[in-house]
Image: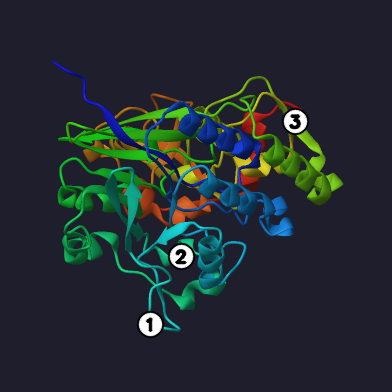
Amino acid sequence: MKQADVIGRVLAVSDMHSAYERTAQLLAAFETEVRSNPVPHVIAIDGDIFEHGNVVAVRSGGVVDWAFLRALPAIAPTMFNLGNHDNDLTLDLAEVVDRMKGLGIHVVSTIGDTRTGAGYAEPSTTLPFGRRSLRVVGMATNSLTTYPKASREQLTIPAAPDWARANLADSLAGADLVMVMSHAGVAADRDILPLLPDGGLMIGGHNHLLFQHRQGRSAYVHTGSWTAAYTVAEFLSDGSVMARSLPIALNAPASPALADLIADTLAANLTEEERVILGTSPRALSLGDTGRSVAAGLAKVAGADAGFIGHTTLGTGVPAGPVSRYVFDSIVRFDGKLMLASVPRAQFDSFMAHANQDRPMPLADRSGDFLYASTIAPTVDPVRIVTTDWCATNQREYFGTTDLRFVEAAGLTVKTASAAGLLTP
């Protein structure tokens, strides 16, 4: 049987969060992909290119992120679906959208502007895709507490599944090829997937996950985070979509102009305090293994039997060698208190069954928000657990319950305990 031809490719990434250690490498990878594959391409960014926790991004006004965006339309038509961090550096999302459009980037979103009653961007658009066309729809997360606080009064956002049930069919009416971009997370996406036409591509973001899922002839993908990987999705002549993920190595070929800009921007904006080496990592760890090492470190420092940390408290995996304060802040993004609770073994086992979702697992078992977890006393009952104050406050989302009674682990903080678990002096 004749193999189906590739009629068009999408290069997809999400949740970059101003991860400058690989931005130039990602740009070079995109250039190579398009140059090496003579078919139509679209670049798709599914939200959160910016990061307020990166002091260099804040001080420089995101000059590196904007240079990356400026370079993309010269490589291939570029789609951007707005996420909850895209006004981290410029609070007025309207200014962000105008600037992106001024660079030739196509923007989609379901986020509305309370000041005007209109959307910050249209929820759908159609792009030429060689001899075909690609209809693109973009949806945002309605979790307002994840957007910059000072901007929340300017935002009105429908729940993505509700919007999709009411509007997706009309938005896709008469479409040729279809790409749906959702920055609403896995839990919301599961309700949207049944509405995806067979042979469509759905790109998910917000949960910092990396996986591919087949649904008939369609593909649903999460593309990872912190510019550690990107996804190639290929529309085939038999009406199907195939997708795979490719990692971005720290030592991969880099786009020279952007690499120089990154080096100059870091040199101009990092303080001596941020350059201080906090410790050394004996080896490089994946994001998941970093999370489990942090969780084990929290447990040891707090005298607990097991540790849990929320997936998006972490940014990137720890590299091998000396780790500066600046780099460490990209590994453990947020500080806070540590909280302790005691739980029956059976309940603890249920927590562990849903933790560490970086592993292969059925889509039905993915919860969106999840915990990295590590056990250091595997047989005790009850189990003394430790987690962050964020996860304790939002225990329904992370632990799936509201009955945990937490008390503060006095004098301990997330970042200090995490450093003890990851680094040697």
Picture quarter with the N terminus: top left
Front tag of 1 and 2: 1
- Mark found first going from the N terminus, 1 or 2: 1
Q: Is residue 177 visible?
A: yes
Q: Residue at x 21, y 25 (%)?
A: 4
Expressed as whole percent of the image width and height from the top left, the position of residue 40 reads: 37, 39
Question: Horizontally, is 363 left or right of 42 in the view?
Answer: left
At label 3, the amino acid type is Gly
Which residue carries the number 1 mark?
117
Please identify the residue farthest to the right as the structure is shown: 272
Which residue carries the number 2 mark?
145
| Circle 2 Cα neighbour tier, 10 Å, few/some/many (<14 / 14–19 / ≥20) | few
Expressed as whole percent of the image width and height from the top left, the position of residue 81 reads: 41, 56
From the viewer's side, name the closer residue of 370 and 257.
257
| Image quadrant assignment for residue 233 | top left
- Mark found first going from the N terminus, 3 or 2: 2
Picture quarter with the C terminus: top right
Q: Are marks 1 and 2 in contact (CB under 8 Å)?
A: no
From the viewer's side, name the closer residue of 221 and 420.
221
In this view, 277 is above or below 252: below
From the viewer's side, name the closer residue of 95 and 290.
95
At label 2, the amino acid type is Thr
| Image quadrant assignment for residue 110 | bottom left
The residue tagged with tag 1: helix, strand or loop? loop
In this view, 136 is above or below 33: below
Question: Horizontally, is 229 left or right of 325 in the view?
Answer: left
Protein image colouring: rainbow
At label 1, the amino acid type is Gly
The residue tagged with tag 2: helix, strand or loop? helix
Which residue carries the number 3 mark?
279
Separation (CA) of disc 3 from disc 2: 33 Å
